[in-house]
Each structure stands twice: as structure tokens, then as C-alpha cells.
Image: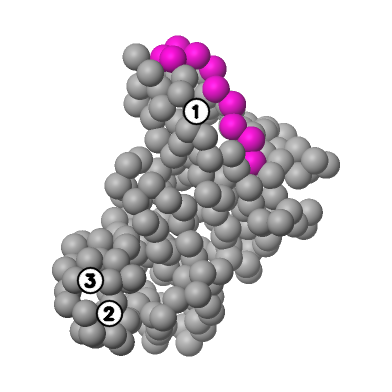
Amino acid sequence: EADIYQTPRYLVIGTGKKITLECSQTMGHDKMYWYQQDPGMELHLIHYSYGVNSTEKGDLSSESTVSRIRTEHFPLTLESARPSHTSQYLCASSVEGGTEAFFGQGTRLTVV
Amino acid sequence: RKEVEQDPGPFNVPEGATVAFNCTYSNSASQSFFWYRQDCRKEPKLLMSVYSSGNEDGRFTAQLNRASQYISLLIRDSKLSDSATYLCVVSLNRDDKIIFGKGTRLHILP
């Protein structure tokens, strides 16, 4: 089993609230990724990181922000949640770009 | 042109049949190739890497055609448990991000 964890697994929150989705991995991987996926739809890369203090925006524009202060931790923050942010958010990590990516179990976010 | 393209399906295939998926990639300099499997409401997991010489893992065979820039996945003697979405994944090089295709949905029918 991969050692990458996301919390919370499920979150229902009101519009306008600030939320942080946590992602941690204990494998020492430099590369970390955040994907957004609606049910039955494709994965969209929204953020990635090559290592500490490195963050890049992905292919899908997102109002969320990320930080990478420690290798093992890659949290995603939404300053003001909206119903359009309702989705599943998946975190992943890999040793390098050309190696297997391990995924967390995801956070299902519902903004009401 | 998208970086990685797959036929979204769904492929509805009777149990025991052989099914093949193709995936094309746009960047000829891509170095690493994978097939992932994603079950409904679960996270993606690595099914197999794809090597230049082709590789086989049980009922699954993966092939790479660099000249035509596509990779393929062949599933023989399909089982009901093979029903899932199969994601084609490409990476330019060791320092680059991984790129997922949209996925191909497979339904194995009893």
C-alpha cells in the first residue's frame, strides 16, 4: 500500500468558508500533484511541485493555492469555497516524473 | 492537439473476450509510459509500465510504437473484475510532470 494520506476524506462546507485539504506522504517523494476529478470524468491537473518551495499551476485553472514547505506535505487551500468547487480532489506523489505515481484516497468536497 | 488522447469508450465486451485500447501522445520526446486502472469512486493505481520492447503481465500486454507515437493495452480472456477505467499516462522525462489521458471505460458483460 502507498504511504500517502489525504484528510479529510469527505467535507461538506458552506459557501465562503476557507478550507485546506491536507496531503502527506512518507515515501520521501520529491514530485507531488493535485488533481480535480468530477464523477465519471477525467483527471485534471491543478497543481504540482518538484520539491520544497516549488509549486506550479497545472493544466486546469483553479482558484485554489498550494504550498510545499516540507517534502512530505502538500496542502491545498481554497480561500472562499463556492458550489463550483464541489468535486473530488486527489493528491499524488512520485519519485520522479518518469516513475509510478501513488495516489491518496481523495477528498470529496461538497460546497453548499 | 491534446498531449495524450484516448478513446473514452465505453467498451462493452463479453466476458472471456479480448479487448484492446490505444492511446496516442503528441510529444515525440516522451520517455516514460504507463497504464493505470481506476475503479469507480477510487483512486487510480498503476497497472503496468510500458517498455520499448513491449511487456506482458498475465493477461495484460502493453506495447509502445514510438514511430507512430502510440501505446496499446491488450487484455485477454477478460474477467468481470476487469471493468474499470483505463488511463494512459505519459511523462516527458524524469524531471517533468506526468500527464494522464482522459481514460477509456471498460464494461465486461456477463
Q: Is residue B4 visible?
A: yes
Q: Viewed as shown, does residue A77 lie left or right of B101? A: left
Name which residue type carries label 2.
Answer: Ala
Element assignment for label 1: strand
Is residue A54 positioned above or below B69 on the image? below
Identify the mark at residue B105; answer none if there is no mark.
Answer: none
Element assignment for label 3: strand
Q: Which residue is mark 1?
A: B11
Separation of disc 1 and disc 2 at Cα?
37 Å
Across and down, in percent, residue A2 comes to 34, 54
Secondary structure character of the magenta stretch overall: strand
Q: Which residue is mark 3?
A: A111
Name which residue type carries label 3.
Answer: Val
Label 2 marks a residue whose chain is A
Q: Are marks 2 and 3 on the same chain?
A: yes
Q: Residue at x 46, y 23 (%)?
A: B12
Q: Which residue is mark 2?
A: A81
Q: Are marks 1 and 2 on the same chain?
A: no
Q: Viewed as shown, does residue B83 lie left or right of B103? A: left
Q: Residue at x 40, y 35 (%)?
A: B84
Label 3 marks a residue whose chain is A
- Closer to the chain start, of discs 2 and 3, is 2
Give the residues drawn in magenta, as a range.
Answer: B14-23
